[in-house]
Amino acid sequence: MDSHPLKVAYESTNFWVYESAANHFCIRCGEVSASLEELLKHMGTHHWAYVTACNPQSTQLSDLENRQRMESLEAVLQSRGLPAFRGEGI
């Protein structure tokens, strides 16, 4: 059993998806999310990824640098016409 501290941390994280101001839901490693499944069905897809530009390789960056990195990632996704939702891992 792999008990590396980062693996344990990621597997115990709640990954929140903010679909809209009124609708948000949580994704957890190894668990099925009915809310995610419903969103994917509504969007007509089965493919998804939870990505972030913050703290690359688990290296802590400043809030400003993380915000700038996320703005750049969002711009790339938008330029490619890829749907994206904001979220956070807690």
Image: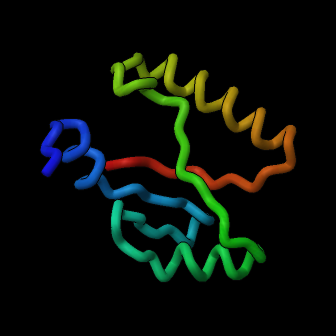
- Which residue is outermost to the front? 1
Name the foreground residue: 26 vs 5. 5
The relative height of residue 48 versus residue 80 in the rendered view (above or below) is below
Residue at 62%, 65% in the rendered image: 20
The relative height of residue 32 versus residue 73 in the rendered view (above or below) is below
Q: Is residue 9 left or right of residue 88?
A: left
Q: Is residue 57 left or right of residue 24?
A: left
Q: Is residue 82 left or right of residue 85?
A: right
Where residue 40 appears, as percent x and y from the top left, is 66, 74
Name the foreground residue: 40 vs 24. 40
Where residue 50 appears, as percent x and y from the top left, is 53, 51
Where residue 81 appears, as percent x and y from the top left, is 86, 49
> Residue 29, located in which quarter of the rendered image?
bottom left
Residue at 69%, 81% in the rendered image: 41
Residue at 41%, 66% in the rendered image: 26
Name the foreground residue: 21 vs 46. 46
Where residue 10 appears, as percent x and y from the top left, is 29, 46
**Number of marks:** 0
The relative height of residue 1 versus residue 64 in the rendered view (above or below) is below
Q: Is residue 87 left or right of residue 76?
A: left
Q: How is the image coloured?
A: rainbow
